[in-house]
Amino acid sequence: MPLLISVTTTHLGGHLSLLDLLPDSNPVAWVRGGEGLVGWGVFATTTVRGPNRFADARNWWLKQLESFAVTNSVHGNGTGPVLFASFSFSAEDESVLIIPQVIVGKKAEKSWITWIGSSHQPDLKSVAPLLVPNSITWDANNNADSAWKARVTTAVNRIQSGALDKVVLARDFTGKADKEIEPRTILKKLAAEYPSTWSFAVSGLVGATPELLLRLSRKMVTSRVLAGTISKTGDDERDLALAASLARSSKDLEEHVYAVRSVADALEPLCTSTNVPESPYVLHLANVMHLATDVTGALAEKLAHVDAFTILEQLHPSAAVCGTPREQAASLIAEIEGMSRGRYAGPVGWIDAAGDGELGIALRCGQIQGRSIRIFAGCGIVAGSDPEKELAESEAKLIPMRSALLK
């Protein structure tokens, strides 16, 4: 007998706070500006790895959908059964797929709940839980900064030799707490401090990404590309001047062009038309500013079976997290970065039964394992990169997670 999935049109309350609904066990989330999806309980989960991980994820998801009898009177993206996914950056690492037992969604004035099973609608307790502050002690490594600057220098030399145009180098820090690290505390702090980003949690990977890798809705695809960064000072006049300098910076514009081109080139074979703005805008976040471009496209009708998994296969890894040319950049990362990224810088978000979805790039994030957390930051390196400035940029990108982990 097929499993029953029910969706209700019940309006769950105008002041519904999605993140306040999350229990302390296996929370999943994708929320921006109070809208999005959260879930809890695990109906089914699996892992995939290898060069075919996106196709393998699709096959597993479609097989799960075959067992469902769906009653959905809401319709629209994110209603009905939803898969939360967190893919690895590298094919060698493990990606995680989760189908939650209960999913609550909110968009504008509409809210809905989806649950698996024949029971009555689950009770929702929209009461902010008592969140225990996380107190973190960071592992000390006095040589970490100098070692990373040396890697940047190596990358610049390779680029200047003509081996490649751009490479993204990442670094990580590990911290430990005296008790289990509470992901909901991190989520709520990030959502409050960075409301224009997408706050996410999937299988212990928690963060707030400003970069939307893919939004697919009714054959329309959008990708927000970020590359080129400058720190904010907190002084409005000074920050406006810095934003103007970022928009004129030849180094940052070069880095941005590579990232935009990689996304546009990946989407073009799948679309009848694409729109790539001629110049980027400056995206203001609480602590940094980025050069940003929103690339959009209309999927070709003749490509009937193109879904979010298909597009992910083409988009990842983009030049924003890998480099260009892709193969040479990935090879240099493997050679000199000196760590496994895991699911950092991989696609993270959700995909629904229609194959539509929203997935960002897992940036400004940390991987929780019990009392330990590993946080990450990466910088795009081009011929004009300066190791000292790249170090400062990486420190700025670590601020969101460091501050979210403070008492």
Image: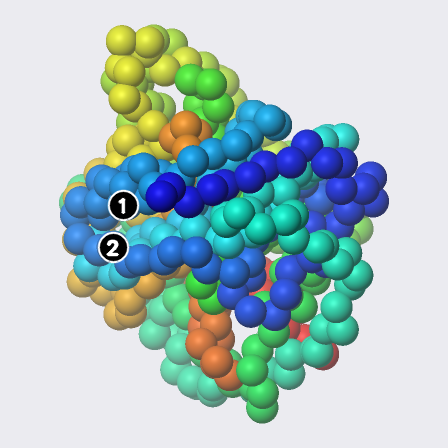
Going by the image, does 202 lie left or right of 240?
left
Please, what is the three-letter code of the amino acid marked with disc 1?
Trp
| Residue found at x 55% / y 39% | 6
Between 94 and 76, the one nearer to me in the picture? 76
Whether the residues at callouts 2 and 1 have beta carbons within 8 Å, the answer is: yes
Residue denoted by label 1 = 60
Residue 136 in view (yes/no): yes
Q: Earlier in the sequence, mark 2 or mark 1?
A: 2
293 to 32, vertically: above or below: above
Q: Residue 159 carries which label?
A: none
Please, what is the three-letter code of the amino acid marked with disc 2?
Val
| Residue found at x 36% / y 69% | 148
Going by the image, does 28 lie left or right of 213?
right
Q: Is mark 1 on a helix, strand or loop?
A: helix
Residue denoted by label 2 = 48
Q: What is the tally of numbered marks visible in this picture?
A: 2
**Residue 345, position as x, y percentages in the image:** 39, 53
Q: Which of marks 2 and 1 is in front?
A: 1
Label 1 packing within 10 angstroms: few (<14), some (14-19), many (20+): some
